Amino acid sequence: MKTLSKDIYQQYKQYPEKILQFGEGNFLRAFVDWQIEVLNKKTSFNGSVVIVQPRGSEKIHRLNKQNGLYTLYQQGVKDGKEVNEHNVINSISRGIDIFANYEDYIDLAGKEELRFIVSNTTEAGIAFDPSDRLEDRPQKSFPGKLSAFLYYRFKKFNGDTSKGCIIIPCELIEENGKRLKEIVLQYADLWEVESEFVDWIHQANTFCCSLVDRIVPGFPKNSIDEITKELGYMDQLVVVGEQYHLWVIQGPKWIKNELPVEGAGLNTFFVDDLTPYRTRKVKILNGAHTSMAAVSYLYGLNTVGETVNHEIVGTFIKELIEEEIIPTIAMSSEELTLYAAEVLDRFRNPYIHHYLMSIALNGVSKFKTRNLPSLLEYVDVKGKLPTKLVFTLSALIAFYKGKRGEEEINLEDHPVVLSVLKDRWENCDGTREGYSQLSFSVLGDEELWGTDLNLIAGLTDTVADYLERIEKNGMKAALDGLSTSLIK
């Protein structure tokens, strides 16, 4: 059986390279790149995406082998009906292995038609690394790579202000576009480049904040044999996503003249302030995902669907949202309750198998961004600890021990995070005092959380209690009694 490529896809078409994308992962391919496919078919956009990978190159090579083509399955409720549909996405022109072919990256900066830059490097990706240098090939951080690219573009077009870019990061951090621009300017200062480049950044480039929402479980490893038989070709880059999607972009209205989303049937729009959309989505949908990942995985479950349909864990997550997250959001409680119900229904999508280990990637930074604000605001509002959120924090720390029973957990996070938590666990002797010391040292690490969490009254002892219960009795016993409606 042949592999998907332009040799067997008769509708293959090449478009001008208008978009640079940092990230080759499942989400961007099922979200941004799919929307570019829609724009190419329904509007006059006429553009393609060039992908640069933030780390390893394996997927870039697979992508190029398939000429940028891949199959997207969209599964879920559409117009009130359950729909399972698929189509080939032809919006990616190529991937650049930035570690092996850096010159191609520099050449791309000189393309006249390139206009947009998008990214999704996880919450941990938008960070300043002072060790990055302009002469590095490549820089270690995503903002370092972006800053170098923009500098090369500035130089190639001699500071022409018509050759700037529209930058739309998709990372789930507050004011992602503003923060990314700040870091680019930090690199301009660190690298001591000419002041005209700083002026060009301000005058020629537009950094938008954006909010993305689509559940993308990724590669359907459990059903790939059936899918391959259905498709009639092999595709190593099949990706599965739900039907629902939302992209809110905070930026000048004139951008939609260049990114013509209106009239294309997309749930993508431009706003003056995306704060209400972001707060609701990040706290409830993403917060629920992050809350359940460690708890449910250590309980013995593997997917989001299993979690929300489970009597014990599902009830725990539902109550966590209703009792401890919604009270921290300054919006109508009725509206938030309806949104939460919609989110849980999306989690129950029978077509989608969203693996908890996928959500667990970079779990510490995700908790810091998605869940810690709710925890802190609950304390401010209620004057007491949110029991369930604190338990999920404890479960996250337990998760980073790297064991589920006798099974090793393949932890994926920033090397500093992995090193810190590994060290703390290795120094825990399993006594009550040992768990107290573990709790105190982890919660007090400001590099992990951005603040000393030991300053929150009662948190250190409560986390130590939960850690001891989880370690000595297991997650099932530790979770017993925490769901209000299940307490006898």
Image (tube, rainbow, N blue to C red):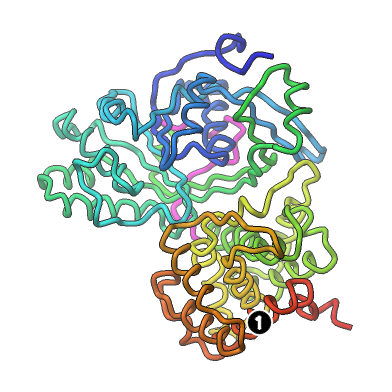
**Residue 158 part of the magenta-drawn span:** no
Q: Please name the residue that numbered disc 1 is placed on.
A: 468
456 sits to left or right of 81: left
Q: Please, what secondary structure does the residue beneath circle 1 have?
A: helix
| Residue 296 higher or lower than 150, as above or below | below
Which residue is painted at 39% across and 47% down in the image? Answer: 208
Mark 1 nearby-residue class (10 Å; few <14, some 14–19, many ≥20): many
Q: Examine the image and state in which quarter residue 220 appears.
A: top right
| Residue 336 higher or lower than 17, as above or below | below
> From which residue to which does the magenta span run?
257-275
Three-letter amino acid code at disc 1? Glu
Closest to the observer: 270 or 7? 7
Q: Give the main secondary structure, helix, strand or loop, of the magenta stretch.
A: loop
Which quadrant is home to the C terminus? bottom right
Q: Examine the image and state in which quarter residue 153 appears.
A: top left
Expressed as whole percent of the image width and height from the top left, the position of residue 243 reads 69, 39
Expressed as whole percent of the image width and height from the top left, the position of residue 22 reads 41, 39
101 sits to left or right of 316: left
341 sits to left or right of 29: right
Which residue is painted at 25% across and 31% down in the image? Answer: 163
Q: Examine the image and state in which quarter residue 69 appears.
A: top right
